[in-house]
Image (cartoon, helix red, strand yellow):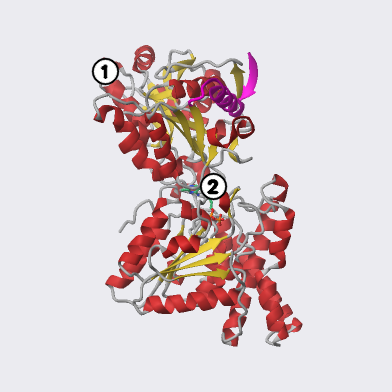
């Protein structure tokens, strides 16, 4: 469906290292979460991001802190890539008062406005028009910020997807639509959901720039997103990027789901061989930007961050029952 | 009769409906999935194929509209929404189209559709995966709303919903799926609009919907130990409401508690209260009416907050005790 492009690394080394770190941070965090779900420590339903790390990372690395991204039920990767605090995320997965949504949201409802993530929604396609709205706000206020809507291929089934693309294109708004096409919507393959599985082509009908990239190649994602984002900043309007990828785990939870007859082990193996982190790592090692020793140091550092996140949640309290109706409205 | 689970009773009703009437079809998300709608649709796809058991993309609005259109031409669609929360996307088709069609054209065409919404809450899922929207649908003219609590009722009311010539919002609750009860093997239907007395009593009437019926029954057992004899009404159909059954009971007990696990303001409890307040029974009440509902807040994720959020039988017990303590002359002792 798409051709792999060879990328010659004209990306600054610092950026490459940063992206490697971010992807690994997401991976290790999610692996930890998976083990904590298996231990029945975490109860809130988690849709793990493992396998898709390059997309959040490539897109968010090309953004400024003051740019906004909206996330979905599969929220952890976007939060981490946009600069979220692992402590607050871990605390939220334990639904503690110190969590990034004060324990009210759980895994599917993650937010930190200070890092430019005003929220993630458990309603498929629910945040796409919100990203358009943020872009409209930037446009009215003559800011050179952009907003990003992350969503899956499943969201292309919802009418609001089309309405949002049209509005953004009509008003030439600074929004980047990022479709993470992991080939599945819950238990259904994309071919059972879409009459036209060429999502990029669907987006083209709105007369906006579109691209399809290897979503497991962080450099492709980064370069394409960066160009589109810079254009959006210059009032050239919205753009659409379809990132081809695969989630390693099942739709929700810590299992691989290959025993349920929904997908084959061969398919999973194929995609695991195309591990986005290994791909960048190999290249960095070849080019001597990364050494095995340095990799160890990075892994140690991430482990420490995750340990600290767990220690933080251990020290944190659950919300108080008395506060059940707190925050329904903003009060003076 | 045999004893089967609530979810099995739904599954059996679906099998029998599809087998006995070629006009019936099932459409919605997850109808072929091993987990999405519990085990309620097991075996359907193999038996009836992908046209009569249509697992859809995430397109609630169009999927519901498809059902409405098919119903207009004589089909008997069952449109399932695996969570009521997703039905907001389908609101136009339900409230503007399906609900109005018969009236708007002077009664020329009806919409015999069953829209099956599942309440799927708890487990730290949070505000967008927890909602119970019976009151919203009951508010809309042209819609019937049923909420079966037992395996017997869920089968009979699903069949009745499909047989009804009007749009019916059929609401079940995943927390009910493992409850067991007697269910006849053959196809049968239960009249929409009829409640049932689950426990006869004389001191206080408890009107409950869906899952709260079981909580009321538990409360009734605890109260019995205290020598309190409650009457429990399972509403079964939220709209049209079985007013006569309410009147008969409240006339006898002169005290009313309502237990419905959706929001309080403008909820089912408000409607029942108003129904009694508008009747001659108002002046015969020995105490104010108490509503046991969710607080007027979205569902929290935290399981600690969930415990505070979802009403339990002890809340009903407390309400009944308060009612009995109440005396019109000396109400300082009372908690409200
Ligand atoms: C409006 C709505 N309908 C249905 C669902 C149930 N649901 C949760 S995720 C999902 C599919 C998502 O697939 P996709 O958008 O491709 O994202 P992915 O899970 O693959 O990341 C569905 C149908 C939902 N959350 N919201």
The chain ID associated with circle 1 is B
Q: Quadrant of the C terminus of chain B?
A: top left
Residue B238 x/y as whole percent: 39, 26
Q: Counting residues from the N terminus, which is met first, the one under dot 1 or under dot 2?
A: 1
Secondary structure at numbered mark 1: loop
Disc sitting over residue A19 in the figure: none
Residue count near mark 2 (Cα–Cα under 10 Å), binned few <14, some 14–19, many ≥20 = some
Q: Quadrant of residue A236?
A: bottom left
Give the residues drawn in magenta, as a range: B1-23
Above/below status of A179 relative to A191: below
Residue designated by label 2: B304
Residue B140 showing in the rendered view: no
Residue A14 x/y as whole percent: 58, 86
B10 or A305: nearer the viewer: B10
Q: Quadrant of the N terminus of chain B?
A: top right
Disc sitting over residue B279 in the figure: 1
A22 or B200: nearer the viewer: A22
């Amino acid at each position: 469906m798409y051709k792999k492009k060879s990328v010659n690394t004209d990306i600054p080394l610092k950026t490459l290292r940063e992206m490697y770190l971010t992807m690994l941070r997401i991976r290790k965090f999610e692996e930890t979460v998976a083990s904590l779900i298996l231990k029945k420590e975490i109860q809130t339903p988690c849709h793990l991001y493992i396998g898709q790390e390059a997309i959040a990372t490539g897109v968010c690395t090309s953004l400024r802190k003051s740019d906004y991204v909206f996330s979905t039920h599969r929220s952890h990767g976007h939060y981490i890539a946009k600069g979220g605090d692992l402590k607050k995320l871990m605390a939220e997965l334990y639904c503690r008062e110190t969590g990034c949504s004060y324990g009210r949201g759980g895994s599917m409802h993650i937010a930190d406005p200070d890092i430019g993530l005003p929220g993630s929604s458990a309603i498929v396609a629910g945040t796409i028009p919100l990203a358009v709205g943020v872009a409209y706000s930037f446009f009215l206020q003559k800011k050179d910020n952009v907003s990003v809507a992350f969503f899956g291929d499943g969201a292309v089934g919802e009418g609001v997807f089309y309405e949002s693309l049209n509005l953004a294109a009509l008003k030439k708004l600074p929004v980047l639509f990022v479709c993470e096409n992991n080939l599945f919507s819950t238990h259904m393959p994309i071919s059972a959901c879409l009459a036209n599985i060429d999502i990029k082509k669907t987006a083209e009908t709105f007369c906006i720039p579109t691209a399809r990239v290897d979503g497991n190649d962080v450099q492709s994602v980064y370069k394409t997103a960066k160009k589109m984002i810079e254009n959006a900043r210059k009032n050239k309007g919205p753009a659409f990027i379809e990132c081809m990828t695969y989630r390693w785990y099942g739709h929700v939870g810590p299992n691989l789901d290959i025993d349920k007859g929904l997908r084959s082990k061969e398919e999973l193996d194929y995609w695991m061989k195309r591990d986005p982190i290994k791909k960048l790592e190999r290249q960095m090692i070849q080019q001597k930007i990364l050494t095995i020793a340095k990799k160890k140091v990075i892994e140690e550092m991430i482990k420490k961050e995750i340990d600290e996140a767990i220690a933080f949640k251990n020290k944190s309290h659950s919300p108080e029952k008395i506060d059940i109706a707190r925050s329904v409205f903003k009060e003076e | 009769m045999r004893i089967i689970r609530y979810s099995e009773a739904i599954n059996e009703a679906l099998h029998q409906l599809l087998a006995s009437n070629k006009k019936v079809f099932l459409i919605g998300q997850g109808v072929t999935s091993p987990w999405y709608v519990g085990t309620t649709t097991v075996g359907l796809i193999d038996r009836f194929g992908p046209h009569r058991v249509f697992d859809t993309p995430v397109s609630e609005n169009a999927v519901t509209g498809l059902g409405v259109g098919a119903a207009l031409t004589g089909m008997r669609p069952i449109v399932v929404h695996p969570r009521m929360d997703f039905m907001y996307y389908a609101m136009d088709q339900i409230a503007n189209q399906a609900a109005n069609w018969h009236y708007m054209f002077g009664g020329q065409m009806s919409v015999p559709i069953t829209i099956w919404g599942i309440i799927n809450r708890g487990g730290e899922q949070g505000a967008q995966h927890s909602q119970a929207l019976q009151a919203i649908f009951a508010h809309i003219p042209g819609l019937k709303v049923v909420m079966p609590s037992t395996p017997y009722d869920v089968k009979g009311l699903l069949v009745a919903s499909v047989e009804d010539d009007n749009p019916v919002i059929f609401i079940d609750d995943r927390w009910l799926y493992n409850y067991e009860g007697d269910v006849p093997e053959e196809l049968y239907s239960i009249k929409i609009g009829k409640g049932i007395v689950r426990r006869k009593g004389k001191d206080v009437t408890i009107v409950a919907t869906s899952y709260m019926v079981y909580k009321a029954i538990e409360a009734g057992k605890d109260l019995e130990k205290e020598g309190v004899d409650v009457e429990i009404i399972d509403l079964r159909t939220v709209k049209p409401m079985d007013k006569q059954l309410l009147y008969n009971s409240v006339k006898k007990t002169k005290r009313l508690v309502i237990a419905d696990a959706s929001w309080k303001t403008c909820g089912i409890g408000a409607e029942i209260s108003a129904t009694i307040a508008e009747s001659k029974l108002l002046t015969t009440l020995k105490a104010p009416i108490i509503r046991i509902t969710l607080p007027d807040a979205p569902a929290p994720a935290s399981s600690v907050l969930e415990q505070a959020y979802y009403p339990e039988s002890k809340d009903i017990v407390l309400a009944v005790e308060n009612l009995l303590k109440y005396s019109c002359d000396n109400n300082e002792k009372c908690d409200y």
